[in-house]
Amino acid sequence: MSVYVGLFLTSFFAATLLPAYSEILFGGLLIQGYDPLALWLWASTGNTLGSAVNWALARFFLRYKDRRWFPFRETKLARAQQWFQRYGVWSLLMAWAPIGGDALTFVAGLMRVRFWLFLVLVAIGKGTRYAVVLWLVFAAQQTAA
């Protein structure tokens, strides 16, 4: 059970501001033979809830955006806002992207996207990402065998 909690926490922090690489841990645990569905659920849930932290930060801490410690620089926010203005809430399906994805979840909070809509779209994107990683690991194992 502690392996799954560790994956959850790594995935959670990977979606926030802390540097963490949950895909590497996820893939390693798959290779070690842990239950793929359980790994997918724990990783997807942790990563989605970590993104919810970004949404909440934007909703409640925007007044600090000029502070040095603020998590997103103006350029990242501007790029994410462009995506958001162009594609609307559907851009949240790209929240899994390694570059700009976290900023999108932050911008969703700025734009006051309804939380439940935010959560559903982000969960779809994050779940799809881990499903792709799962498929890639299994495909690589089949090729190596």
Image (cartoon, rainbow, N blue to C red):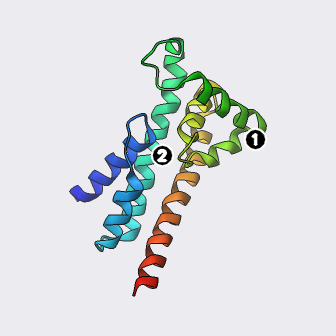
Q: Position of residue 63 (x, y in %)?
A: 53, 11
User: Which quadrant of the structure image shows residue 137?
Assistant: bottom left
- Disc 1 is placed on an element classified as helix
Q: Which residue appears farthest toward the left when viewing the image?
A: 2
Task: From the viewer's perspective, tell me whether residue 123 is left or right of residue 31.
Answer: right
Q: Looking at the image, which residue is at 28% across and 52% down?
A: 5
Which one is in front, 38 or 26? 26
Q: Is residue 127 left or right of residue 10?
A: right
Check residue 48 in the rendering and tell me which mark sits there, or answer none. 2
What residue is at 75 percent from the left and 41 percent from the top?
Answer: 87
Q: In this image, 83 relative to 108: left or right?
A: right
Q: What kind of residue is marked 1?
A: Tyr
Residue at image position (23%, 59%) is 1
Q: Considering depth in this image, is 111 or 67 the residue closer to the camera?
A: 67
Q: Point out residue 50 in the picture as x, y percentages from the top left corner.
A: 43, 40
Q: Which residue is mark 1?
A: 87
Q: Amino acid at mark 2?
A: Thr
Label ID, residue 22: none
